[in-house]
Amino acid sequence: MGYYIFSYGINTAEIKEAIGSKDNDLFEDILETEIFDNYSDQNFPGHTTTREALEHLIFGHAYDARSAHAYWYAFIALCAHLGQDLPSTHEIKLGYETDLINGYMASDFGIKVVIEEVLINERNEWGLPVVQDWPLSGLLDRNQLTKLQSLFAPIEITDEKLEQLQEEDDEKEMAYDSIRQTKENIDYCIYNNLDLISFCH
């Protein structure tokens, strides 16, 4: 168990346009996705359901702040549907793996970063109710991604290096692989003119 960080590449303007768009086809399409189906199992008794939250999002109904989690789950399904899967889809375990990444970034590459604070920066441009616990979120726009690309530029992690670490140190291999994947996702978003949105739950 635990909490994991995962990301998508999105066109922020497209996501904002979808919210309140009253696009019934979009609503129905999202209802059919596996991701929405997974989140619809997380409904809490007495709270807005994920389906209702998605309907509120797309058709512009007032939000129920008590059920902020449902709106964020619906929003994740929206981003997954309209956004793009990134080339590297590994989910980063909060606390355990993020600590390893931060440690090796500093010790082996001389880069001081708190990766969970970078990815989950709580930037909320969507007008969604503030969630009290989970899921958490963060948005990186092109300007922020470009700065991160420069920060990660000196890092070179080859397949051979990962294979070597797999024989020597499983934890370090996992952290190195996550560092490389994060770098690949940043490069992909910049190349494809996408923003990077991350969630954690």
Image (cartoon, rainbow, N blue to C red):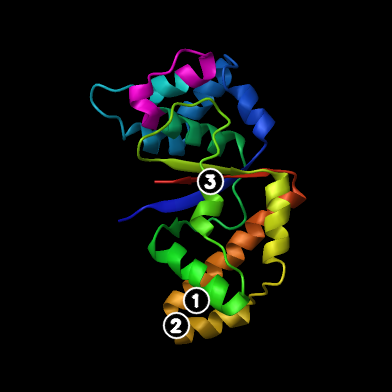
Tag nearer the camera, 2 or 3:
3
Q: Amino acid at mark 2?
A: Asp
Q: Amino acid at mark 3?
A: Asn
In the rendered image of this protein, does residue 136 appear above or below residue 180?
above
Circle 3 sits in a helix, a strand or a loop, which is it? loop
State the residue position of label 1: 173
Q: Which portion, as a residue range, is magenta?
A: 56-70
Crowd class of label 3 (few under 14; some 14 to 19; many from 20; radius 10 Å): some
Q: Earlier in the sequence, mark 3 or mark 1?
A: 3
The alpha-carbon separation of the residues under discs 1 and 2 comes to: 6 Å
The alpha-carbon separation of the residues under discs 3 and 1 comes to: 26 Å
Tag nearer the camera, 3 or 1:
3
Q: Whole-percent x and y of residue 25? A: 57, 19
Query: What residue is rendered at 51% in x and 82% in y?
Result: 165
In the rendered image of this protein, does residue 194 appear above or below residue 154?
above
Q: Are marks 1 and 2 in contact (CB under 8 Å)?
A: yes
Circle 2 sits in a helix, a strand or a loop, which is it? loop
